[in-house]
Image (cartoon, rainbow, N blue to C red):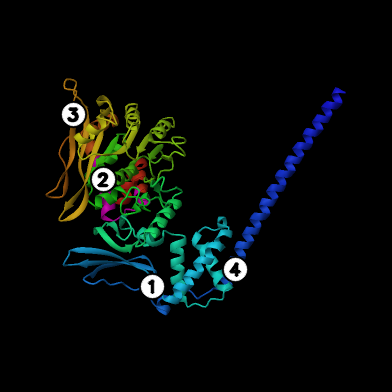
Amino acid sequence: MFLRRQKTVQVEKREEVETAEKETEIESTIEEVKKEARKKRRLLGKEKTKEKPVVEPYSREKHGELVTAKTFEGYREVDRYWVYEPYVFVSILYNEDENDYLYVVNEPELNPVELEIKSELEEKLRDVLLFEDIEDYEHKEEVLKNAVDRLIRDFRIKMEPVSYYKILYYLVRDFVEYGRITPLMKDSLIEDISCNGHNVPLYLFHRNYTNVATNIVFADEEELNSYVINLAQKCGKHISIAEPMVDASLPDGSRIQMTLGKEVTSHGSTFTIRKFRDEPITPVHLILWKTFSSEEMAYLWLCIENNKSLIFAGGTASGKTTSMNAVSLFIPRKAKIVSIEDTRELMLPHENWIPATTRDAFQGEIGKIDMYDLLRAALRQRPEYILVGEVRGKEALTLFQAMSTGHTTYSTLHADSVSGAIHRLENPPINVPRPMIEALDIVSIQAQTYVEGKRVRRNIELTEIVDLDPHTKMLRTSTVFAWDSVRDEHRMVGSSKALEEIRVHRGWSAKELEEELERRKKILEYLAEHDIKDYRRVSAVVHGYQSKPEKVLEQLGIA
């Protein structure tokens, strides 16, 4: 009886396993069939589009311009450039009487018939796009264009090529891109975009013209509220009257701060966008902009390669994070790096890099992951270099503990001088003990300043933490490089403890150290003179020099 029962159990188990295997096989077969069907549907859709284009391709020579320049009384045009050719160009206008610049976005103008067609297509698209399978398409614009073409065929709408492309631009702008601020997001010369409420022009910070008003205005309060809610949804966040403030990252990586309604901002909903660069800033950019000299960069290159810790301090928008990102290019190619930020800003060419970002709580404090949590986790990952977006709380103590135990760390801090940086580190809410600050090697002080009436960013000084005086308990510092504001030059004004430690560690003589710095300076000057600033090419030279210095020097023709 027992053997028969055991046999029955074994048979039942075998049948269960066979059934599970069959179900898995059926599910995988169904999924394969679905994938094949989607593929065929996509290919058929593409073939149809290719066979019967809705309109002929746009040609500027044949069809003329899609957009014309706007004019404003009292202003004359001083600059013009495309941001999205052939749909949008920007005009910089100047008013001599008021010494005022105006940033004008020039987009295609729609006539009443085109506006009506656009409105009809917008209404129909909301229903059509619900049933689109976006997974099989690389670009959302392709999905939208195919849907628009189908609607035009189905409703037999007759359009001229110019009208078609003008309407298509607005549909892509509003459905896929960022709506009315899309031209600003596409302009690589803009750093910040600010909306200060309804019925107020949007302001921006332009690299060539600093703070400038634009011709973009959200006149209606409800329209602006709706737009801010839409921006929050693009970021995967929720904003409401109950929670009217949100910090987030846009899909392209730009940082955004939003407020909704008049709960916290009197003029209505607001948003401020700190734009994210597609191409990372390199040390060559900083040399060309005169933020640092080639000698300072050669010094930082040698220090970073030899594991010296560094903090970039300065005021708001002084270029702290930009400089930290640029000099991080000097980190050896295969070194393990962990970066920790509130919102992603750092971009490194290194493969052995773990970028970590904080996370807000789901409800109350549940699920919250802050800088301190990420830094503790990073120390368990055995990194050689730790990059922290900004120290402002209890995570600073952990960061300095990491420095004391041999980890190389880079971070930014809000302070306008070395003494100010030390004072901030020592006092609440950071509270780093003074003996621990001795583990920090270099402090870079950056500022926004003026040269010949133009606003520029400059590294004011590079200072080293020498030691802690045993009698007075004061930190002794040494300024190695300082900026001469009269001549707009960076000069070496003191001796370097960090370079002396590197010399001893590497077994070099004083002359060999000097020659090594000179070689690195010449490499950076060569890259700057030949306008080689693409981060891939710059990193290839930097990392090539770290492995085969003679070969790189020979290729660049440097003796």
Residue corresponding to mark 1: 109
**Picture layout, residue 134 above or below residue 446:** below
Residue type at mark 4? Answer: Glu
Q: Position of residue 508 (x, y in %)?
A: 26, 32
Q: Which mark is residue 316?
A: 2
**Picture layout, residue 70 above or below residue 331:** below
Q: Nearer the viewer, mark 3 or mark 1?
A: 1
Q: Are marks 3 and 1 in contact (CB under 8 Å)?
A: no
Indicate yes or no whether the magenta region holds residue 259. no
Q: Which mark is residue 476?
A: 3
| Camera-nearest residue between 79 and 124 | 124
Q: Nearer the viewer, mark 2 or mark 4?
A: 2
| CA–CA distance in space, label 4 to label 3 | 73 Å
In the rendered structure, the answer to whether residue 159 lies left or right of residue 181 reads right
Mark 4 lies on a secondary structure that is helix
Q: Is residue 373 visible?
A: yes
Q: Are marks 1 and 4 in contact (CB under 8 Å)?
A: no
Residue type at mark 2? Answer: Thr
Q: Quadrant of residue 337?
A: top left
For the N terminus, the image quarter is top right
The magenta region covers 516-538
Q: Quadrant of residue 477?
A: top left
